[in-house]
């Protein structure tokens, strides 16, 4: 077992666990968007940031991918963390103001739409990858994939064709935190 500190409290976790896993095990809340306990961590949304002091320096890291180490001091709600998190929630809200999960996050962190909010878009895809990973890791098929890179990166079916691999299980629709999946592939939610 590895012993370290979260918010001034001594905690323990098994070697290989992440800060997020240990925090949740001990009932310490860290917000997430792209994380799902049934899936491999992906590190896309950055919402799970925490501040880690390893005795040499203090850094803001993403807790869903940061492996625990003996003696580190973790703060889940320091001023630095709160600042970064608020910016992330602001970006999410400006792009997906209609998504209930994003609205809930905004309410929790006291964020309101900014003047940069996208007009006419209520449910944007944030490329969290939950749909692609669920399709591959849970359903065991490859009906969805990431296509393109950089600013043109998007969720697509292979070769932009209706995928013959799709078993219409609907898990991609279920895990999507914004409802973008339903808009991208309305045929999946059709009866
Ligand atoms: S469609 Fe939804 S689940 Fe898929 S990457 Fe976009 S936001 Fe995430
Ligand atoms: S939950 Fe950690 S980066 Fe998304």
Image (spheres, rainbow, N blue to C red):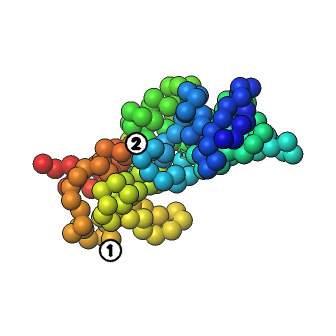
Marker disc for residue 177? 2
- Residue pointed to by mark 1: 159
Ligand 1 within 8 Å of the CB at mark 2 = yes
- The residue located at (32%, 74%) in the rendering is 159
Towards the viewer: 110 or 101: 101
Residue 136, given in percent of the width and then of the height, sits at 36, 60
- The residue located at (48%, 53%) in the rendering is 40
Ligand 1 within 8 Å of the CB at mark 1 = no
Towards the viewer: 172 or 98: 172
Q: Identify the residue at the far right of this view.
A: 56
Residue 72, given in percent of the width and then of the height, sits at 76, 40
- The residue located at (76%, 36%) in the rendering is 73
- The residue located at (51%, 68%) in the rendering is 149
Report whether 175 appears left or right of 52: left
Q: Secondary structure at mark 2?
A: loop
Q: Is residue 104 above or below residue 123?
A: above
């Amino acid at each position: 077992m590895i012993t370290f500190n979260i918010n001034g409290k001594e905690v323990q976790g098994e070697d290989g666990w992440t800060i997020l896993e240990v925090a949740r095990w001990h009932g310490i809340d860290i917000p997430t968007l792209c994380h799902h306990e049934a899936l491999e961590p992906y590190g896309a949304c950055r919402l799970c940031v925490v501040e880690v002091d390893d005795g040499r320096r203090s850094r803001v890291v993403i807790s869903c991918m940061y492996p625990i180490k003996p003696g580190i001091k973790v703060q889940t709600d320091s001023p630095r963390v709160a600042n970064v998190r608020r910016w992330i929630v602001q970006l999410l809200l400006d792009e997906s103001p209609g998504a209930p999960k994003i609205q809930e996050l905004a309410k929790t962190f006291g964020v309101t739409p900014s003047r940069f909010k996208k007009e006419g878009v209520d449910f944007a895809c944030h490329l969290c990858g939950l749909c692609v990973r669920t399709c591959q890791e849970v359903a065991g098929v490859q009906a969805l994939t990431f296509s393109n890179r950089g600013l043109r990166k998007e969720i697509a079916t292979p070769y932009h064709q209706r995928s013959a691999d799709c078993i219409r299980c609907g898990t991609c629709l279920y895990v999507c935190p914004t409802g973008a999946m339903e808009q991208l592939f309305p045929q999946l939610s059709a009866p």
